[in-house]
Image (cartoon, rainbow, N blue to C red):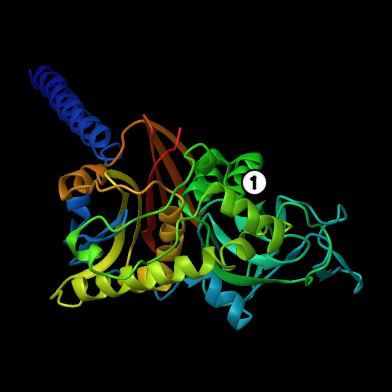
Amino acid sequence: MKSRWSNVLRVLGWGVSLSALYAFVIVCIASCAGSPTKERAPADQGWHLSQPVSYENLTIFPVVSTQDADTGGFATLDEAIASGEALVTEQGDYLRRRRDGSVGPIASTGAQVNQLVLVNRGKRPLLLLAGEVVSGGKQDRIIATDRIVPAGGPPLLLDVFCVEHGRWTGGSDQFVAASIMVHPTVREKAAVAQDQEKVWAAVRGDAAAADGVVGGLPSSSESASAPAAHAQVSAEALSRVIGSAAPTQSYRKIYQSSPVGVSVETFAQEIEGRFNRATNGLKGEHVVGVVVAYGGEVAWSDIFASSDLFNAYWHKLLRSYVVEAVTRPATIERASLDDARDFLRPLTGHMREEAEPDVYRWVERVEGRESQIEIEALHPQITLHWLKVLRAN
């Protein structure tokens, strides 16, 4: 009898255990299926939009947040090159010591258009954003894609795009930070299209040529009372600049020359003043990014993990948006707050992912004409930069 009850209890015990295990598995599957694939809405990240500032055909919506991450553990490209913590040079020009004590180039192939050598000699990981210009070497280049370079690692073969078609000699062996970000039309061809020919075409202004004369005129009572911020910049004017001031089609020379450079700086200072006045009164909130519209079209956003990181990039980002504005048609249309809020909606389309173990994770999502790119540091785990773009085609 005792043996019989023992068998019964044993069976019941297994049944209870199996039922508990089954329930546990179901809960785990439901939980695991939901969390990794769920996209966090901007509201979950503490983002919301402040009142926009507009001038001519450009409208900028400040992105503000009560959250302000500590990003002091990361260095930007400009500050790292300026301090000597980062070295950027042509392939073959960087010498490293071999085991036998002799020195030799990092690569025997010599200089390459679409690759440079980067050495992070500092104590902090280095954040790189697609579209940042480095000047020197045989040609000026831009960073090809957002990425993080760990501190103290070996020399890195860095993917780049050329923005100086026609020169392949002279210049310093080492590159300096130009403190320039290419404008969105060019930046898109690097970050999203990842196509050298399209980058060169965008630098030449081929994309703007189809629009004929472009530029901006005052389009509100506020801007109508202000002095003209910039001259119209047409495809023909851009071609003249290329032919005279920048015969090698150097992006840096094109947009620092007259009439383009003066126009851009005057326009940028006007927007910057309005932006500062609009955001100076924030209490308990921090500006961490912007959404950018040209006329009635919301086309771009750059958002960061902290206000410090945003401020580090703001000077050159603003000027990149202005360059885009002066090569777009004048319009009296204005994008609304609702348009900008809709642009912040996370994409759920096709995903492409790249990663370097224990360093960073890069994710791109594409949905219709929109592309969204995030660069996430893994130690500590934090999304440093969130980019969204309305592709030209």
Residue 18 shown left or right of residue 193 in the figure: left
Between 154 and 131, the one lying in front of the other is 131
Residue that numbered label 1 is attached to:
200
The answer to which image quadrant residue 305 occupies is bottom left
Residue 210 shown left or right of residue 216 in the figure: right
Q: Residue at x 37, y 54 (%)?
A: 216
Q: Residue at x 57, y 68 (%)?
A: 256
Percent of width and height locating residue 392? 44, 37
Between 118 and 54, the one lying in front of the other is 54
Q: Is residue 42 above or below residue 149?
A: above
Percent of width and height locating residue 143? 59, 56
Q: Is residue 66 above or below residue 349?
A: below
Kind of residue sitting beneath label 1 = Trp
> Outermost residue toward the bottom?
83
Q: Residues within 10 Å of mark 1 (few under 14, many from 20)?
A: many
The answer to which image quadrant residue 80 occupies is bottom right
Between 338 and 126, the one lying in front of the other is 338
Q: Is residue 240 above or below residue 35?
A: below
Q: How many marks?
A: 1
Q: Can you say which quadrant of the picture contains the N terminus?
A: top left
Percent of width and height locating residue 28? 23, 34
Q: Is residue 165 above or below residue 253?
A: above
Q: Residue at x 41, y 71 (%)?
A: 266
Between 211 and 113, the one lying in front of the other is 211
Percent of width and height locating residue 241? 63, 59
Residue 70 appearing in the image: no
Residue 393 shown left or right of residue 14 in the figure: right
Residue 138 appearing in the image: yes
Assign a secondary structure to mark 1: helix
The answer to which image quadrant residue 167 occupies is bottom right
Q: Residue at x 25, y 47 (%)?
A: 344
